[in-house]
Image: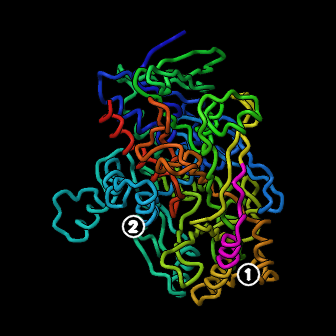
Amino acid sequence: MNQEFDYIIVGAGTAGALLANRLSADSSKRVLLLEAGGKDNYHWIHIPVGYLYCIGNPRTDWLFKTEPESGLNGRSLLYPRGKTLGGCSSINGMIYMRGQARDYDQWAELTGDSEWSWAASLEDFKAHEDHYSLDDSANSLDPKIQERARLHGSGGEWRVEKQRLRWEILEAYAKAAIQTGIPATEDFNGGDNSGAGYFDVNQRSGWRWNTSKAFLRPIKKRPNLEIWTHAQVTKLNLITEADEQKKCISVDVRSNGKDYTLDASLEVLLSAGAIGSPQILQLSGIGCPAHLASVGVEVKHALKGVGQNLQDHLQIRTVYGVEGVKTLNKMASTLSGKAAFAIEYALKRTGPMSMAPSQLGIFTKSDPALKHANLEFHVQPLSLEAFGQPLHDFPAITASVCNLNPTSRGTVLIKSADPFQAPAIAPNYLATEEDLKVAADSMRVVRGIAQQQALAQYNPKEIKPGVQFQTDKELAQVAGDIASTIFHPVGTTKMGQKNDPEAVVDSHLRVYGIRGLRVVDAGVMPTITSGNTNSPTLMIAEKAARWILQDN
């Protein structure tokens, strides 16, 4: 069966959902949105604590694993990626975080395009934002509200709210961070996220707010929009035009056991994420010729940067036992405790079932000589041996700390021509001396906070990594034992200037050398943002949608 559309969007995740919304607003254009997963009708997607039941669940997760990592002492990590409408926004930690102004100014410099600067990107963040601080503030003359309106949007699709619970131990931890010289902050999203405070979250009234609810549900009845679920793209098809330029004209799709070739008259937009998009490109013969030949894929277009430049945030999960204060470990250890959580959530949409995986955030420096914060803390009133395992049976907190600007680079490479075989994901964590040094220093920063007076009454005891690890070498070694991904893969289809040998797309996200094909997802980031990556991906999609409409 052949069908023709003007735009075909591959992936209904964070970027793809927004693209479908914006492009289908032009009623003269036929838009097809393809999602390999199913509908987002699983109840645990929408209950905030449900991420625990979505990650590692084949209904909502691709179930990827990394290759064994030498920097992690040979360990392989689970690598969750959303496989449902909304993509990773349906299973992530819900944290609304833009990063730092310097991230976007660096992109502008690397691409030679000022449209990526912080000043220009701020407008694209605001374009879809609905920030709680601006509720009922129309025409306010309050200078504080006016400053919020300069930085944030109101009335957009992407809801941002305060978290709906507080913890005594987290309040104390924030005070301890301040006692070390880290400033308090009410807003991490003004361009400099240094400070300690509670994360804002993508929730609405205690429910997860994913991109499917935000951008797809309001428009699903548009007559010019089709949304296919359980539809996995297996290949892109190229032709060579009269002027010898290549053009992407269609996609091959496996949907509910049937194969289709679907034509795109204007553009194919790859929004399958930093793992899925390079995989599809390589399966289509677009990538490094030597690698494609090694796995039996005919080379259609040489582009050696495809699947290179993988960057991710590696978090070191430090755990401290505490005394005389509530943590989730004890509260969730009994049936009565769990029942109380359920009742509170059912009645008020508050309590532990409404909480994001991490509540308290801290951004600071691993070395005082640095100009900007290069560490992010996710502090939680709970602890466990590893993600997916039961909570510890003693009261404890976790302070996960990650290097915001890793210098290590990895790869995403297909293992064969089989589109249903997962690619080899090799983040190459802790592969540089710089990253090893930051890892060691970051654990010392954690120890410095734990020693402050604000925490003294809770008698914090270091469980992980353990006080026996002191030297740079010892701390780097133990980091390899306890660190895990924070699920922020980016960079595998990087944007850059034409003279950049690793650049896959130009500054308007068009694939070099192929007409009618763009990549619009986190893979285009040349460098990872200094914070969580979901909302920056939405900003990228907002820009891309505007450019696509202008070009067509």
Query: In front: 363, or 136?
Result: 363
- Which SS class for mark 1? strand
Range shown magenta: 426-442
The image quarter containing residue 458 is bottom right
At label 1, the amino acid type is Lys
User: Residue at point 75% right, 52% down?
Assistant: 77
User: Residue at point 53% right, 76% down?
Assistant: 364
Where 339 falls versus 23 (above or below)? below
Rate crowding at label 2 as few (under 14), some (14 to 19) or many (20 or more) other CA atoms within 10 Å: some
Query: In front: 462, or 412?
Result: 412
Give the quarter of the figure containing the C terminus. top left
> Which residue is the site of mark 2?
191
Residue 482 position in % (x across, y down): 76, 65
State yes or no: residue 438 in magenta.
yes
Q: Of label 1 and label 2, which has the lower sequence position?
A: 2
User: Residue at point 60% right, 45% down?
Assistant: 305
Residue 342 position in % (x across, y down): 58, 51
Query: In front: 442, or 432?
Result: 432
Instruction: Between label 1 and label 2, give the one nearer the viewer.
Output: 2
> Which residue is the site of mark 1?
461
Residue 456 visible, this angle: yes
In this picture, residue 519 sits left or right of residue 141: right
Q: CA distance from mark 1 to mark 2?
A: 35 Å
